[in-house]
Image: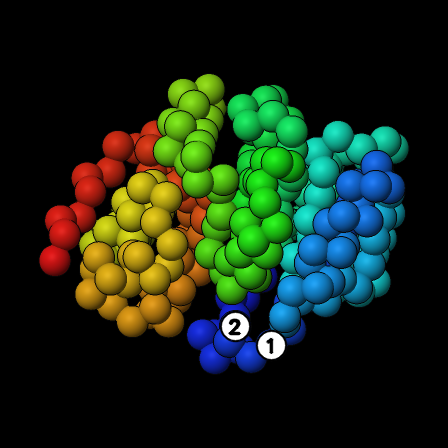
């Protein structure tokens, strides 16, 4: 199930509601302090493990769930899968390591973004806001490296997925190729000379047609398929 993206107007005015999950109280308190102090961000719940994170998301329906990957009882991968499958929130994964198996698992489970724990306060707030407005977010230092590494370890696009690719319009295929470059909705809109709202509509249709859970999964698929890059305007 894919959550509907906010319109640009909504993103500019609405408060981003966040659930945090980390088993280390000091880390969780620090994240809450940073996000709770940012304009337009409200931390509505905190969890110490994956089970509690899923329960809070089901109860509170936040815009974004910020999850550590390594937690007791239910890890971040399993929690991500449950939250995304039921459309409870978009998920931003936090990890200490930039290319570990946990991150790959979380992205396969449908996480909308991934951030290193050593990211500064501004980077954390930016990542949460980016995910909330419907853009995927991967730590800038490893965006293309992560997508390429994930694609190299993935089993490859299934025959059904390749067949579904034929249902995309030429413009949707261009948008998918841009997702493979790690571009945001606004960057895609600029490159393809579209309105950002039109780009969001294309992304939503691509995810639905290809039965994908997140734009990050779409980016990985674009890499696997080797889609040609649309030219600059």
Crowding around mark 1 (Cα neighbors within 10 Å: few <14, some 14 to 19, many 20+) is few
Contact between marks 2 and 1 (CB within 8 A): the answer is yes
Q: Which residue is rendered at x = 34% and y = 68% of the image?
A: 196
* Residue pointed to by mark 1: 14
Crowding around mark 2 (Cα neighbors within 10 Å: few <14, some 14 to 19, many 20+) is some
Q: How is the image coloured?
A: rainbow
Quarter occupied by residue 87: bottom right
For residue 141, the mark is: none
Residue 212 visible in the picture: no
The location of residue 226, given as percent across then percent down, is 26, 32
Residue at the outermost top position: 153
Kindly report the distance in space between the C-alpha atoms of the residues bearing marks 2 and 1: 6 Å
Secondary element at tag 1: loop
Left/right placement of residue 201 relative to residue 14 reads left
The location of residue 158, given as percent across then percent down, is 42, 31
Q: Which residue is rendered at x = 46% and y = 19% of the image?
A: 153
Left/right placement of residue 78 relative to residue 195 reads right
Q: Which residue is rendered at x = 65% and y = 33% of the image?
A: 95
Quarter occupied by residue 221: top left
Query: Nearest the camera: 99 or 212?
Result: 99
Residue 171 visible in the picture: yes
The location of residue 49, given as percent across then percent down, is 85, 40
Query: Which quarter of the rendered picture does the C terminus lie within?
Result: bottom left
Query: Nearest the camera: 170 or 126?
Result: 126
Query: Which quarter of the rendered picture does the N terminus lie within?
Result: bottom right
Secondary element at tag 2: helix
The location of residue 12, given as percent across then percent down, is 51, 76
* Residue pointed to by mark 2: 11
């Amino acid at each position: 199930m894919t959550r509907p993206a906010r319109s640009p107007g909504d993103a500019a005015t609405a408060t981003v509601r966040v659930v945090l999950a980390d088993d280390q109280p000091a880390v969780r308190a620090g994240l809450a302090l940073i996000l709770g102090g940012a304009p337009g961000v409200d931390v509505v719940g905190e969890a110490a493990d994956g089970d509690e994170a899923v329960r809070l998301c089901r109860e509170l329906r936040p815009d974004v769930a910020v999850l550590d990957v390594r937690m007791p009882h239910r890890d971040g991968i399993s929690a991500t899968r449950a939250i995304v499958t039921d459309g409870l929130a978009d998920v931003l994964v936090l990890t200490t390591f930039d290319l570990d198996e946990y991150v790959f698992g979380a992205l396969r489970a449908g996480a909308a973004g991934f951030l290193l724990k050593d990211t500064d306060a501004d980077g954390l707030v930016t990542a949460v806001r980016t995910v909330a407005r419907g853009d995927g977010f991967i730590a800038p230092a490893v965006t293309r490296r992560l997508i390429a590494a994930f694609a190299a370890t993935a089993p490859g696009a299934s025959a059904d997925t390749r067949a579904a690719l034929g249902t995309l319009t030429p413009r949707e295929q261009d948008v998918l190729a841009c997702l493979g470059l790690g571009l945001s909705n606004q960057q895609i809109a600029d490159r393809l000379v579209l309105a950002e709202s039109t780009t969001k509509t294309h992304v939503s249709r691509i995810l639905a047609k290809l039965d994908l859970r997140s734009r990050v999964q779409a980016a990985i698929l674009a890499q696997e398929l080797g889609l040609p890059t649309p030219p600059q305007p």
